[in-house]
Amino acid sequence: MAYAQSVLAVYVAAGLCFGRDGQRLRPHFVRYRGKTGDMAGPDLPLCDFGAQDGGWAKGTAFAENPAAVAFRALIGISLPEMDRGPLMSGQWQPGGLATAWHADPPAPGDFVFSYAVSPTTPAPADIDHAAALIGALLDVVELLDEDEVIVPGWIAQGAEKRDLPAPHPAAPPEIGARTDGKAGSGHRQPLHSVVGAQPSIVALARHWSLVAGAIADGSGLPAPITGFRLRRTADWQVPSTGDPAEVYEHLGRVCNVSCKFCYLFGNPGNLAIARGTRVIRQDEVETRLRYFLADTGQALFHAEWENNETLVDPKLPQLLPRLREASDKPFFFVTNGNPLTPAMLDLLASVKPVHVIVSINSANPELRADVMRESKTRRARALEGLYGLDDRGISFGISLAAFPEFPIDDLQATIEHVATLRAAYVRINLPGYTRYLPPEHPFDTPSTWARVTEWARALRAHVRLPILVIPSAFEENLYHDDPVAARVIGTIPNSPADRAGLRPGDVIERIGLLPVTSRASAQALLSLDRGDARLTVRRGAAVHTLCLDATAGAFPYVGESYGKYRFPKGMVLAPSLSDADIRQVCDQIDDYGAKNAWVFTSRLMMPAVRRLLAPYDLWDRVRLVPVDNHYLGGNIQVLDMATIGDMTRHVEAETTAAARPDLLLSPGTGFNREGRDLLGRHWKDLPNHFDIPCELMSCSRFTF
Ligand code: SF4
């Protein structure tokens, strides 16, 4: 932020920036874009224009070349690299001017975070340099005049004028390859790992590409710059939730099987998540561990890599005990099961609380080996590993992919097998695919999903395990009139909900004296209630009262948390929208006085949104817009995997002069913690592009 502040301050003070209306801009503050206003951090001062406009209003020359000031800010936090190493001292010498630097040696021990650079050729003229740099920084920060956000449209220097870059919201940032590990620059991290997670590093890369062509070494000889490195690791510590996954998730960069349906193979090449080709280096893990301070809520900057099979990284055994000392939060792993050797099981048992989802897919060894392309030894270990989890009292759930490769008879045999073990639940993934990896055996999505769902519903009657079918909205919409009712999918064996006698299909109508209006409200009330609770439950035509003792419970019930799932008191309910979520929609419409607000949703979740919005009688002011996922294609429907480009397509296609939206409302769950979509584009690029106000709504994942 200090870097962006220094660079923009000098350009703003030089009076270069103009609004789309042609007015010269005078922003006083700069603020990190963040995801929402309260997460954006403090406003930092840009420059004090004083009571008078002073010299800047006439566009007079700044006392020093702004590009040189910007370069000093750049060199303050990063260093250029040639193929053979960093350039610790040198000079930037565009047009005969030279700005020299000399850097101290790096602190020993820290991993060097380094990224590739492609020099811009030919070197841009001053005003083009300024436009490109300001454009890059305005992807990371926004300018403010007091509380109002100012969006510059162009810059001018003397008689010359340049539009600021404003890529279409569907356009991916141009940042090179997504994979690591190319020979010669193998130590470099792909920018895809930070474009959504730490976009300021991408701004640094853009700045380096502008200046790289004019870098010389200490003796003035041209230095071919191929990359840059972060100068001091400590500069890149960020607020942390204290979740140890922020460290160990980096160990999941490779997998030891190759499932025919692997969702990772279906990822587009420009996804804002890097692809690893080898395990993480020891010194990177050590550095991340050193800067992970759960007590004070700090960690090294986030980076996003495809999450493969964490349990295969040989560094895990020495890492987990050290992380357990640093944090008592649960560890959560998704594994294909074959790394569950006795030694691994003992390790996991020694660092509880741990929850593991085992993607067992099939208990038939031949079938599993064929579809997951797995060796004989490994498939045997995966199936034996389930017994090991059970023996050691390690909490686990089972995951099955209902692709046609696994016939229903096989899924049933697998579930009946795991039901003899103390798994907490079974999760059946309805088969999903993107346009980049169509299924090997094509199927019709609605009929296949309906067939699997119907079978799973029947199975719940005679298997004690709760069986989730995801995305769960498909079942809730297909089989029930009320898509948000607090309908029980099942209960964790030995949980308070199980012992109270709740059954699949029961609908919870009251908890104590409080009416339950949605699954979300049932989950919230059950989470809050620490003592006994009386549940009023509708079972078919009958109404029952059940007593739930919050203190009753034994393994596999381990409390509310099961990895990414929350099952309060062991009650398994599908996620749903809440009344509070919908009230946000109404409040925003009122606050903006909107006459034609568009609410983005998905075809899957739209019945629930419609049902909860109905009592507010806003249909003359609000329109639900189900967003088609053009980016991923295939049969992907959930809005949390759509991009702002997908939303943009709808606004472009469906806006008419008579029906232009005056407010756009989007759930925030499709954007990462920085407010970025799957391409790394910030959600505010949507309102900026259309000049229509837009707000993000907070809600649970997979509910819109
Ligand atoms: S186990 Fe998971 S990550 Fe590995 S190939 Fe299969 S689906 Fe992909």
Image (cartoon, helix red, strand yellow):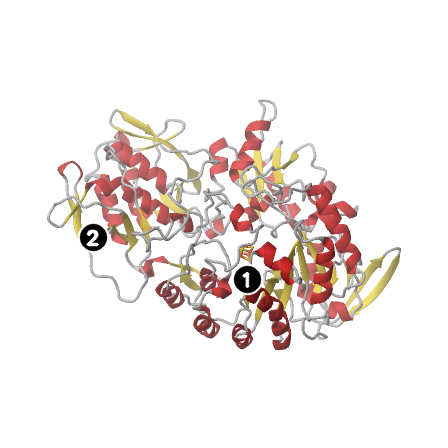
Rendering coords of residue 96 (x, y %): 13, 38
Residue at image coords 31%, 49%: 3
171 lies above or below 534: above
Tell me which corner region of the image, top left, top right, bottom left or bottom right, holds residue 151.
Answer: top left
Secondary structure under the numbered disc 2 in the rendered image: loop
In the picture of the structure, the residue carrying the numbered disc 1 is: 375
Tell me which corner region of the image, top left, top right, bottom left or bottom right, holds residue 564.
Answer: bottom right
User: Going by the picture, which residue comes out furthest to the right?
Assistant: 541
Q: Going by the image, does 404 lie left or right of 152? A: right
Residue at image coords 26%, 47%: 226
650 lies above or below 411: above
In front here: 678 or 362? 362
Q: Going by the image, does 693 lie left or right of 143? A: right
Asked if disc 2 and disc 1 are in contact, CB closer than 8 Å, the reply is no
Residue 9 seen from this side = no
Ligand 1: image quarter: bottom right
Rendering coords of residue 264 (x, y %): 52, 50
Secondary structure under the numbered disc 1 in the rendered image: loop
Q: How many marks?
A: 2
Q: Few, some or many C-alpha atoms within 10 Å of disc 2 (few <14, some 14-19, many ≥20)?
A: many
In front here: 430 or 647? 430
Residue at image coords 43%, 46%: 33
Q: Tag 1 or tag 2, which sits nearer the N-term?
A: 2
Residue 83 seen from this side = yes
Mark sitting on residue 87: 2
Quadrant of the frame with the C terminus: top right
Rendering coords of residue 109 (x, y %): 29, 67
The amino acid pointed to by label 1 is Ser
The amino acid pointed to by label 2 is Leu
